[in-house]
Image (spheres, rainbow, N blue to C red):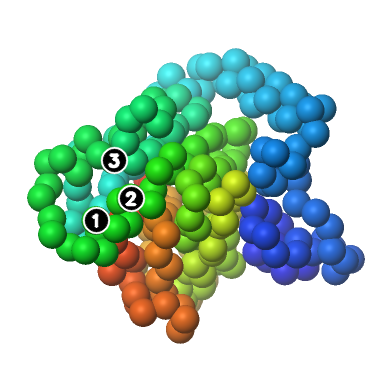
Amino acid sequence: MNWNMEFVRGIREPYYNQDGRDSPPPPYSRHPQELSKSEDSAFSESRLTSQLSGSGEYSKPWCKVAYWELNVRVGRQFQTSNPTLNVFADLPHGDGMCLETLASTRITENASVLQTRTKIGQGITMFKEDQKVWVYNRSEYPLFVNSPTLDPPNSEKLTVYKLLPGYCINIFDYELSKLNQRLRDSSTLKNGPIDEYAVRISFAKGWGSSKYSRRCITCCPCWLEVMFLVHR
């Protein structure tokens, strides 16, 4: 079985099961308009139950998010203990992390940054459900994501995945992270300075592949660094 396909179910490309056959992604990986009422209701109830039953778990912050423009961190880090976090361009797109407020502290004339800011729109919703963290693309443009739990342990570099509007992706798996750590500790391979508890999300612009002009995340106009607060 392909390592990545089990954990990447929000992309509009075929999802392959263990038999190698095409199968659709889970209901919550599709655009909300494609959901039946029963599927939508079941997912909502599942999330609500998870949040209520885990009220003690979320009493402490579980992640912090930093907003970057190119290689400059903009504003303060945003820390949350709520299982759901919205990150959006400007008000009144929701409650949560408003990037316009952070960007107001920095004046820039970079055309790429200014243009990408206009594409963020409703941005993302990130939610923690049991031992997994999901990101839903609420904007009208693709997101680009890399995560240490979307690739095999000791990968030399992390794969960048494209997430189209209206889809979600499992960006972090706590159990898999623990497994990766054990495998990494027992391995002689060196995978460089990869933070195994950090995920990077770029708005509208990809990086790191031969088809993109940007070789690294700090060349992307607007991006997020999501750092999970776990026992190290």
Q: CA distance from mark 2 to mark 3?
A: 11 Å
Q: Which residue is mark 3?
A: 99
Secondary element at tag 2? helix
Which labelled disc corresponds to residue 54?
none
**Place of residue 94 in the rendered image (x, y in percent of width and height, measured from the top left):** 41, 28
Tag 2: amino acid? Thr
Residue at point 50%, 50% (across, down): 140
Residue 62 appears in view? no
- Binning the other alpha carbons within 10 Å of mark 3 as few (below 14), some (14 to 19) or many (20 upward) gives many
Tag 1: amino acid? Leu
Which labelled disc corresponds to residue 118?
2
- Quarter residue 212 falls in: bottom left
Q: CA distance from mark 1 to mark 2?
A: 7 Å
Q: Which residue is mark 1?
A: 114
Residue at point 20%, 44% (across, down): 103
Task: Note whether 106 is above or below 60 in the view shown.
Answer: below
- Binning the other alpha carbons within 10 Å of mark 1 as few (below 14), some (14 to 19) or many (20 upward) gives some
- Binning the other alpha carbons within 10 Å of mark 2 as few (below 14), some (14 to 19) or many (20 upward) gives few
Earlier-in-chain disc, 3 versus 1: 3
Q: Are marks 2 and 3 in contact (CB under 8 Å)?
A: no
Q: Are marks 3 and 1 in contact (CB under 8 Å)?
A: no
Residue at point 57%, 56% (across, down): 164
Tag 3: amino acid? Leu
**Place of residue 12 in the rendered image (x, y in percent of width and height, measured from the top left):** 67, 60
Q: Are marks 1 and 2 in contact (CB under 8 Å)?
A: yes
